[in-house]
Image (tube, grey):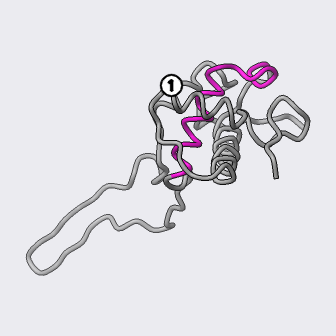
Amino acid sequence: MPLIVAPADGFDSLVSLDDASAYMAAMGHAWGGTDVAKEIALRRGTQYLLSRYAVRPECINPVHKNVSAACCEAATRALSGALFADVSAQHVESVTVGPISRKMSAPGNGGQVRFAVIDALMRDMTTSGPDALKLVRA
């Protein structure tokens, strides 16, 4: 199924395959694989950005260069692994085996992987920070 690129209605990617390939070449990212795999990665990158950040509408129509770059960065990471990490509900805080004890702290971000370059690219493209919750009055 071909990509539907923003700002078209029903879009599933913020970047076209050709634009993503040009970005990857310019930035030196490995962007191998089939076009189908690349399109899936772009869809996952778009899903990541739109679910993690409250992207301002004016940054999607037309797609701002930073949003496009962030989508490409997310897509390249989607090719090599998951963008979202499933986090176990329990965390071991201390372990004792015989005379040896070890104390550990819980991850500060709930175990979710953070991508500093994507956070930086999206800094001025959102209505709030990456961990903020958008509330709407009923």
Q: How many marks?
A: 1
The picture places residue 54, in percent across and down from the top left corner, at 70, 32
Q: Which contiguous range is marked in magenta?
A: 58-79
The picture places residue 67, in percent across and down from the top left corner, at 65, 26
The picture places residue 108, in percent across and down from the top left corner, at 41, 47
The residue sitting at 86% across, 34% down in the picture is 137
The residue sitting at 66% across, 43% down in the picture is 42
Identify the main secondary structure in magenta: helix
The picture places residue 90, in percent across and down from the top left corner, at 45, 68
The residue sitting at 63% across, 33% down in the picture is 20
The residue sitting at 74% across, 23% down in the picture is 63
Q: Is residue 115 left or right of residue 124?
A: left
Quadrant in which the C terminus appears: top right
Q: Which residue is mark 1?
A: 26
Q: Is residue 43 left or right of residue 10?
A: left
Task: Answer above or below: position of 53 versus 104.
Answer: above
Q: Is residue 108 left or right of residue 95?
A: right
